[in-house]
């Protein structure tokens, strides 16, 4: 069997080398599966250029893929490549539209370098512009270090409620993204409760030699709230059907599971903080179980 250059010499006798080789080929087979589904074709040069492997190894990878998924592709002499089969079934469960579109978004936004992406050809794509949140790398590193080591943070924090920043001791245990900003979930020694803090408002953060928390006692972090979304009943039937398609609703409803700690932000982003008004075209969805959900508000926020 043809191996990648220097593979046997570099690691054949090392512990875990066989597992590493299997993982490497599995990654290449996942690449084949991805390209076939979303671009409809694959050839050996795609593999050799992306992974830096030899042509014989690429040939073996394609052969292995076709043995595992015989109906997924067939060789086309005209294009000298493999074209997707009409009965294609993804070999990998992650090979779904969400994976493709998320990777396309990351590429378009500049968060994923092209050389690390499985995407080859991409359609013309734009994203809605949003303000760039500038974060100080040393602060992010301090937050991550404190969470990883279970330590506290000394923080200078600029809140909305006070004109000047305040010095606080925080015990962080997690981070959250509300769609626009990153938050740090932490126990605040000043307020003596778990709160969320906007990462960009930390002007200074350094790890303190004081034991932190793993968040076990943060009940809002662990409490999951079910949000039952439905089309606004004031909309015409045909319009409600469109809303159901937009949100992937089944029988006129979709359930979102949300941690109580970020419930406020979820409702705000969905436009559901206030009850449905008389403008159904503006507020197209409603919170069907609103009474039950609102019991979990107000949340402590900073």
Image: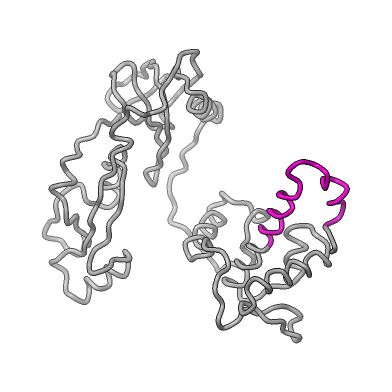
The quadrant of the picture occupied by the C terminus is top left
Q: Using the image as rendered, state which of residue 225 and residue 180 is in the foreground.
A: 225
Residue that appears at 54% across and 67% down: 124
Task: Kindly identify the residue that appears in the image at 43 percent across and 48 percent down.
Answer: 130
125 in magenta? no
- Where on the picture, by quarter, is residue 164? top left
Picture layout, residue 65 above or below residue 21: below
Residue 58 picture location, percent across and down: 77, 66
Q: Residue 292 in the image: x percent, y percent? A: 15, 47
Q: Seen in the image, is 257 located left or right of residue 122?
A: left
- Residue 56 shown left or right of residue 179 in the figure: right
What range is drawn magenta here?
A: 4-28
Q: Residue shown at 71%/59% (left/top)?
A: 25
Give the dominant element type of the magenta stretch: helix, strand or loop: helix
- Residue 106 in the image: state x and y as whole percent: 53, 54
Q: Is residue 14 magenta?
A: yes
Q: Is residue 157 above or below residue 84?
A: above
The number of numbered badges drawn on the structure is 0
Residue 301, given in percent of the width and then of the height, sits at 28, 31
């Amino acid at each position: 069997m043809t191996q990648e250059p220097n593979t046997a010499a570099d690691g054949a006798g090392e512990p875990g080398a066989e597992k590493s080789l299997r993982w490497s080929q599995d990654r290449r087979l996942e690449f084949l599966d991805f390209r076939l589904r979303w671009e409809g074709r694959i050839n050996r040069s795609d593999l050799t250029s992306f992974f830096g492997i030899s042509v014989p190894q690429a040939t073996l990878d394609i052969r292995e893929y076709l043995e595992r998924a015989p109906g997924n592709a067939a060789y086309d002499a005209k294009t000298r490549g493999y074209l997707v089969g009409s009965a294609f079934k993804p070999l990998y469960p992650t090979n779904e539209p969400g994976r493709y579109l998320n990777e396309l978004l990351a590429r378009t936004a500049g968060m994923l370098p092209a050389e690390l992406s499985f995407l080859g050809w991409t359609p013309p794509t734009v994203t809605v512009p949003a303000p760039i949140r500038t974060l100080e790398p040393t602060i992010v590193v301090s937050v991550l270090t404190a969470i990883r080591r279970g330590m506290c943070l000394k923080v200078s924090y600029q809140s909305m409620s006070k004109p000047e920043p305040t010095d606080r001791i925080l015990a962080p245990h997690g981070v959250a993204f509300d769609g626009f900003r990153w938050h740090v979930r932490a126990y605040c020694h000043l307020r003596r409760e778990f709160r969320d803090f906007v990462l960009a408002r930390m002007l200074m953060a350094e790890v303190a030699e004081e034991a932190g928390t793993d968040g076990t006692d943060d009940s809002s972090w662990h409490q999951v709230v079910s949000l039952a979304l439905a089309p606004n009943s004031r909309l015409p039937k045909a319009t409600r059907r469109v809303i159901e398609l937009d949100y992937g609703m089944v029988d006129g409803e979709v359930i979102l599971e949300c941690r109580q700690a970020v419930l406020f932000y979820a409702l705000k982003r969905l436009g559901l903080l206030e009850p449905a008004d008389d403008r159904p075209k503006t507020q197209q969805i409603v919170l069907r179980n609103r009474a039950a959900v609102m019991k979990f508000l107000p949340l402590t926020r900073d």
